[in-house]
Image (spheres, rainbow, N blue to C red):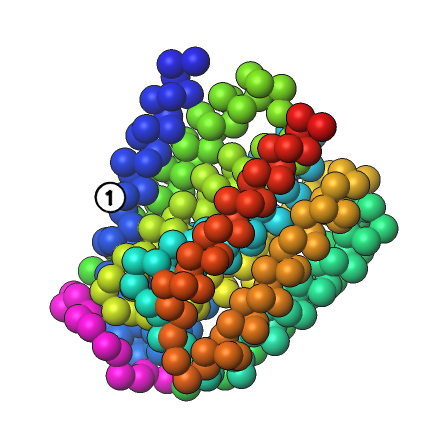
Amino acid sequence: MLLPLVAVALGLVGLLWSADRFVGAAAATAYRAGMSIMLVGMTIVSIGTSAPEIVVSVMASLDGTPDLATGNALGSNIANIALVLGVTALVVPIPVRFSIVRRELPLLLGATGLAGYALADGQLNSVDAALLLALLVFSIWWLFRADEGQQAVAGEIPGMALGKALVWLVVTLAVMIASSRGLVWGATELARSFGVSELVIGLTVVAIGTSLPELAACVASALKRHHDLAIGNVIGSNLFNMLAVLPVPGLLAPGATDPDAAGRDFPVMLGLTLALAAILLWQRRGRVGRIVGALLAASYAFYLFWLGTSLTA
């Protein structure tokens, strides 16, 4: 019991240390390379902070626990919208740019719909995985094609050369991944000692643990006024969770999925994704404020309560 507790504590410390430096390195990389901050949030930061989900899903599938991987993908998206974006908006209200609505939201909605189609028959197989990965390739191509180049950025960008920024980006990303992995391992060991199912572990302990990099990066981005990086990271992470994390069990451990994944958890994720779309459409010339943030955070607390009651039913 002591070793998992130590892993959780060290994981939290590592995430807190690396988050601020990682965001600064990402912003500097965008500036020096001539890329827009939004594009970096949608690609470099999103892939980087989604790496723990990918690693956990691969290991879970190889270990013969694909439901943990499925729960990780669905639970991370639920946590990203309700917990990460909600807490970030509570800390600092987030301005919304129309380009997010025009370019990134259609990709996320399409990925969510395709994920629902893949889960609808209660199976995840290689065909489902191939469809999701094909949309991933298209999404990456579309984001680079639609990038508008360097734009004015509110807030200070660290004055470091491109080479130094890239080194810091790699180092801090490695610390974030290692810290998140240690945190998830320790929390999972603690949860399993109480006899919790693999799907619920993936939806709660693993999803929250692997979403901590997104939470830390988004809050740090918002405090530095890199608002495009904060919102772009949430949308991009959810996109990659559906198209790069969810296909993993279909490739490595194809077979039946837990019925609750399609019947309970996907509808929650779909509802939150549609709510996010409505919020961004409504606030496309304004900002995501603290009231919306409080509602999102409260919805996540309610979801966790619902999961808890379903376990005791």
Residue 178, given in percent of the width and then of the height, sits at 38, 38
Image quadrant holding the C terminus, namely: top right
Give the residue at x 71% y 58%.
115
Q: Is residue 180 left or right of residue 154?
A: right
Residue farthest toward the right in the current orientation of the protein: 121
Tell me the magenta residue range.
149-162
**Mark 1 neighbour class, 10 Å CA radius: few under 14, some 14 to 19, many 20 or more:** some
Residue 198, given in percent of the width and then of the height, sits at 65, 31
Give the residue at x 58% y 66%.
275
Q: Is residue 111 left or right of residue 105?
A: right
Image quadrant holding the N terminus, namely: top left
Q: Is residue 49 above or below residue 61?
A: below
Does dot 1 land on a helix, a strand or a loop? helix
Specify whether residue 216 is painted magenta.
Answer: no
Give the residue at x 42% y 73%.
39
Specify whether residue 151 is painted magenta.
Answer: yes
The majority secondary structure of the magenta stretch comes to loop
Residue 272, given in percent of the width and then of the height, sits at 59, 60
* Residue 80 seen in the current view: no
Q: Nearer the viewer, residue 275 or 127?
A: 275
Q: Quadrant of residue 200?
A: top right
Q: Is residue 243 left or right of residue 164?
A: right
Q: Mark 1 highlights which residue?
A: 17
Residue 124, given in percent of the width and then of the height, sits at 77, 47
Q: Is residue 192 left or right of residue 124?
A: left
* Residue 205 seen in the current view: yes
Q: How many marks?
A: 1
Residue farthest toward the top in the current orientation of the protein: 1
Give the residue at x 55% y 16%.
193
What amino acid is labelled 1 in the image? Trp
